[in-house]
Amino acid sequence: MKFYDPEGAEYGIPTYPRRLAPEGLATRRQLRAKGLRPAGQPVVAQILWYGRRPPGATARLVRAAYLYRLDLAAPVRPMTPGLWRAHRAMMRARRTCPACCTVRDYVIPLSLGACVSCAAHELAA
């Protein structure tokens, strides 16, 4: 079976294919869904699988998800007023158009580099 190496002889750490990881291990997303975080623990295993083939490539990419122990995970830290302020400031910066300096109700698309109205004005000019 491809990517099945529970002893870690081939890949350096225990490796499993998708959906075959043992109980008691979880990815970061799975930890977060349970209200937990890795809390500084090292990666104990990984899941490997083939991703989509990039356009024009001949080989498929190997994707990885790292696994952490559930028994060593800690609860997620609560948001403090200072963290909320920092989050609002960060989001305000992502919503501010660099061309017209207007704070928009949406995040400025990186593909446009400016708000939709400024980008449309540039295309029309």
Image (cartoon, rainbow, N blue to C red):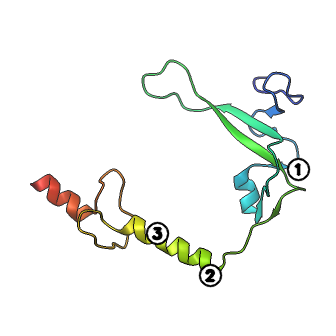
**Whether residue 24 is situated above or below residue 62 in the rendered picture:** below
Determine contact: label 1, label 3, CB under 8 Å. no
Please state which amino acid type lies under the numbered disc 3.
Answer: Met
On the rendered image, what quadrant is the C terminus found in?
A: bottom left
User: Which residue is under mark 3?
Assistant: 91
User: Which residue is under mark 2?
Assistant: 81
Q: Residue furthest left?
A: 125
Which mark sits nearer the N-terminus, 1 or 2?
A: 1
Which mark sits nearer the N-terminus, 1 or 3?
A: 1
Q: Position of residue 47 (x, y in %)?
A: 74, 37
Q: Secondary structure at mark 3?
A: helix
Q: Residue furthest bottom?
A: 81
Q: How far apart are the two marked residues, 3 and 2, measured between alpha carbons?
A: 15 Å
**Whether residue 23 is situated above or below residue 88 in the rendered picture:** above
Please state which amino acid type lies under the numbered disc 2.
Answer: Pro
Disc number placed over residue 24 in the picture, else none: 1
Residue at image position (23%, 68%) is 100
Please state which amino acid type lies under the numbered disc 1.
Answer: Gly
Q: Secondary structure at mark 2?
A: helix
Q: How far apart are the two marked residues, 1 and 3, measured between alpha carbons?
A: 36 Å
